Image (cartoon, grey):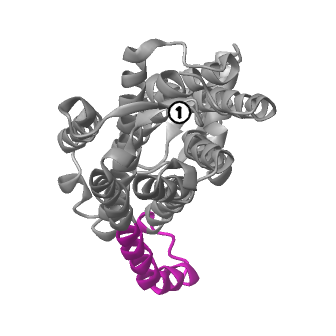
Amino acid sequence: MLTEIPSDESICYGIILSTLSILTLLGNSLVCLAVWRLKNLRRLTNYLVCSLAGADLLVPILRVIYINISVYAGKWVFGITWCHISSMCGVLLCSASILHLCAISIERLIAIKWPLSYDAKVTPKRIVIVLIYIWVQSFVLSIFPTLGLAEQRFNPVLAECEINWLKKPTLTILLIVFYFFLPVSVMLIAYAIIFKEVRRNSRRISALESAGNQGSQNNVFKREMKAVKTLAVVVGMFFIMWMPYFVTTTIRAFRGDDLIPGALQRTVITLAYGNSCCNFVIYALMNAQLRNAFHHILKECCGKRGTRIDLNSTRGLNLTTVSTKRRTKAPMEDKDKYRRD
């Protein structure tokens, strides 16, 4: 199973895949580490985000690293068995990512549309059930080829193993509709309702602020909206980076691989794999408090302590740092004040 990538392109292709793998591993590991190390971050929304980061983290481990080695070696060197497993992992992780994003969008819709009944609707038990459903459904989808519904092959143009879409074009359409366009439609509808609700309440919030009423409900609403905007960008980036792959896959399923140039196929699949490292970058760029949290976690890992991280919102990606020095000084200040009095 030799590759058909030109030597000059293989070097560039391999370097890009290596860079994406490193960024994906570091960024998503940091997200998982933050939720695991800090109890204050263990909120329901963050469990969904952490599971999504776990799916992105597995992309280089179970997929990209083997493609990268095959690019440099000029052939698939891991055997036919791992070729089939690698193909299954590709379908598994893609399906898991989009189902996670769909679940997050619905959770955000409930938080914004029905904030008073959020705790009754979104419970830890239901979050666990949703996560189990996401991974089980993704696994069932990935084992379709072993059930005789499709076959797997090595694509020499991409140096990766994948489903032979040309053999089952009808199955290709069903998978793309039910596992891409339908979840994306649900996400778009959810965020459309969210921003409509925000627009409806904007006048009320402005009126309260102008009257000097800085109620806790308004502050919570603002924090929730910051999380919504961040996650909306995550969903939009997923759509932009995966859409070319599904379009070209549909063309290949009905017209064959020759209709799509090899360089274009590699560009499209690079965009798709690049999405795995985008979420962490989006979190760091759009959420200053989350960026600050990552900064303190890295300082702690490097041995620099003295700060801890607390979660300001009960249902959002809104973090605030609290200085431990101030907490230790506060009792002394109160004591001095008591003496003066």
Front residue of 180/75: it is 75
Is residue 237 a member of the stretch shown in magenta?
Answer: no
The answer to which quarter of the image holds residue 135 is: top left
The region drawn magenta spans 188-217
Asked whether the viewer can see residue 24, the reply is: yes
**Rendering coords of residue 11 (x, y %):** 78, 28
The residue depicted at 37 percent of the width and 24 percent of the height is 84
- Looking at the rendered image, the quarter that the C terminus falls into is top right
Amino acid on which the number 1 mark rests in the picture: Val
Q: Is residue 110 above or below residue 327?
A: below
Q: Main secondary structure of the magenta part?
A: helix
For label 1, the SS is helix
The answer to which quarter of the image holds residue 14 is: top right
Is residue 214 a member of the stretch shown in magenta?
Answer: yes
Q: Is residue 121 above or below residue 222?
A: above
Asked whether the viewer can see residue 34, the reply is: no
Along the horizontal axis of the image, is 26 left or right of 143?
right
Residue at label 1? Answer: 31
Front residue of 13/294: it is 13
Query: In this view, which residue lies farthest toward the right?
Result: 8
**Rendering coords of residue 173 (x, y %):** 32, 58
**Rendering coords of residue 209 (x, y %):** 55, 78
**Rendering coords of residue 43 (x, y %):** 37, 40
Q: Is residue 320 above or below residue 306?
A: below
Along the horizontal axis of the image, is 181 left or right of 21?
left
Along the horizontal axis of the image, is 140 left or right of 185?
left
Front residue of 65/124: it is 65
The residue depicted at 50 percent of the width and 29 percent of the height is 57
Along the horizontal axis of the image, is 183 left or right of 73?
left
Front residue of 81/294: it is 81
The residue depicted at 68 percent of the width and 50 percent of the height is 285
